[in-house]
Image (cartoon, grey):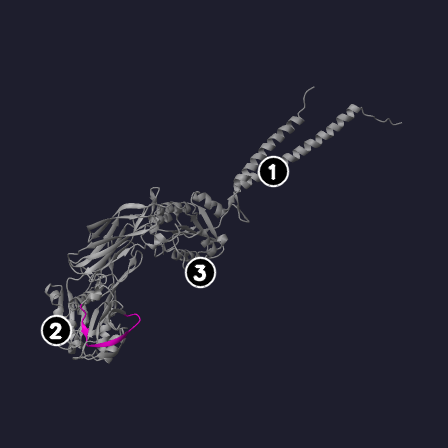
Amino acid sequence: KKLKRIPFSSLKFLQAMQKEKIRQVRIKQLLLLLLRTLIIFLLIAAFLRPTLKTSDFAVGQRARTSMVIVVDNSLSMAITRRGQSKLTEHRQRAQEVLQLQQPGDDVSLVTAAYPARQVNESPLYNAENASSALESIEQRASSTDLQGALEIAASALAASRNLNKEIYVFSDLQAELPNATALELSGQSTRLFVQNEQADPQRNLSLSSLRIDNQIFELRKPVELSVEVKNNGPIDENGKMVYLLLNGSRVAQGQVDVPAGESRSVLFRVVPDKPGYQLLTAELENDALSLDNRAYSLFYIQERTDVLLVGGDADDRLYLRLALQESIAEGGMQLEEMDAAQLSRVKFQAYDLVVFCNVPSLSPEVGQRLQNYLENGGGAVSFLGNAVDLRNYNEQLFERFGLGQLGESVGSQQGGQAILRLGTVNNNHPIFQGVFEQGESEKIDSPEFRFAVVARPAADAEVVMRYSNEAPFLLEKRVKDGLLLAYLASADAEWSDLPFKGIFAPLVNRSIRYVAGQGGMPGREIFAGQPAQVSLAGENLQQFSVVTPDQSVQQIRPNIVNGRFAVSVDETRQTGFYTLMADGKVQYVWAVNFDAAELDTPPLPNETFREIYGENNVVVLDAETPMQAALQSWRYGSELWQFFLVLALIGLLAEMLLFRAKKESTSVKPS
């Protein structure tokens, strides 16, 4: 009979404990294996430097990138704060972007000062070259052409084959985007980075304009000026000095108080003592923005006015010759007379202006030559008379030059009673400016007219004086660069007693000086960055050059257009005077100013860029955040290697504790 083994209860207990212990050891060994495997995985993941970018997960590698850096070097970027200009601050931030350039990346630089341009003709693949090109960007006094800069940037990226495309805008965003539809990003892989500019208003006064109130300029006669000072800063400015310079010499100064956000005018009066170009400069004391502390303007005083007087005969010209006698005697005017029969041979370009007095008719050939003369800056004054063919004048003078149309005549040419007197006068016109006190023009000793021709003026012809029946007496019409004055009266005693009145001589003299001097003013105001252009007559002019405000000399090659020299300075980068020289003589001068509207333009909100480019394509960077850290996050995503490394360290600590517990539990103590 087989014996049945019955273990002691204590032994049975020990065997059960042994099985439980073996199970625990195996579980701990399995946990250690899994934990060590996880630690190795976490360490490998940390060294791979994974990133989390939106919904995509990238590991390690990155695609090549094409970058376009738009740097705003316009007027408003010259404001200094914390000891350096905005341009310097933004250029430093742009240098941080260039430090991210890797092999295979390319960089293009675009300046946003008008006109926007690309600094480098082809992409730069070397970070050092890109950095040097960035440092070479100079401050300009022109306005911001952000529209043009972004269009250039989009065009540069459109030619790139790289997967990632980025545009960085370093600007105070004081700009406008008039044609937003023209701004397109090339593909969904393009991102626009804009720095969030912090508002930091600085104390700043600017000279927004230097206006010349006169239009008739004579030697040793006063010229009135108005200088407008604007306070762009946050506090009132009191007792600020404004200085006026004439041809480089300080001739006047004034004091002004300007409340914050407002403008005030300072009036000056100068008396030129020599002929030629009169260069005017207004100056303020330096402040946070020095480029807007000067304003420039100019006018021209002819040394001698050459006048051609054309009449039917010498008697027709008599009273005009007598009216001009004093100016001729003073040497400021040279008068040449000619009968109407000689008009077909005259060269109008040899004279500053031509006066027609009772010329019977103008041939179509003379009319065309007169039109060419006026369009190229010449001047003309016409008087009617007994011999005038009104139908011919309608065709060759009034209709050709847009004066209107001659109509019916009233009264009698010889004898008879006066039917008209002078009526309203435009006292604000340059001919009468400063001649009459307010209301005195109505008290002048008016001529009495026995005969007159009624004209119907064109809509764009200015009526300077009227008859008492409101019909025009004097019409003005600008013909491109020239000027035409037409008197609806005769300059002799046949129609009226005008030649015997005290108003006749001043009226004739000021009319001629006004028409002859109208070319002495710039044709239009030129702002920095805009081209400066002029058309000059002169068959023998050679060796053209332009002297810029910093006294550097640029050689110019003009074009020949209709027998005249068409000169153009393509880009005026500085404010000040640009002097055109030919054969060592001054031919023309331009006054170039900053555009005051640049400082009044509010910054573009970030929403504007999001509306144009889309929410996901625009990244707004904080000005206080280090540029590299911010761009690393956006370019590569949020890096996760730190997270994996921390998890691996936690795992190593857990493994160490678990291994120590296992070692203690399996150790055998001696009995």
> The residue tagged with tag 1: helix, strand or loop?
helix
Question: Closest to the observer: 596 or 139?
Answer: 596
Residue 398, percent from left and from top: 26, 75
Question: The N terminus lies in which quarter of the figure?
Answer: top right
Residue 475, percent from left and from top: 25, 70
User: Which amino acid is tagged 1?
Assistant: Thr
Question: The C terminus lies in which quarter of the figure?
Answer: top right
Residue at numbered disc 1? 37
Give me the C-alpha separation between circle 3 and circle 1.
56 Å
Residues marked 3 and 1 touching at CB (< 8 Å): no
Question: Closest to the observer: 567 or 318?
Answer: 318
Residue at numbered disc 2? 318
> The residue tagged with tag 2: helix, strand or loop?
helix
User: Which amino acid is tagged 3?
Assistant: Thr
Tell me, yes or no, if residue 119 can be seen here: no
Question: Closest to the observer: 573 or 405?
Answer: 405
| Residue at the far right in the pictured view | 1
User: Which amino acid is tagged 2?
Assistant: Leu
Give me the C-alpha separation between circle 1 and circle 2.
118 Å
Tell me, yes or no, if residue 495 can be seen here: yes
Q: Residue at x 24, y 75 (%)?
A: 397
The magenta segment is 445-461
Tell me: residue 538, above or below residue 223. Answer: below
Residue at numbered disc 3? 181
Give me the C-alpha separation between circle 3 and circle 2.
66 Å
**Between discs 1 and 2, the one toward the N terminus:** 1
**Between discs 3 and 2, the one toward the N terminus:** 3
Residues marked 3 and 2 touching at CB (< 8 Å): no
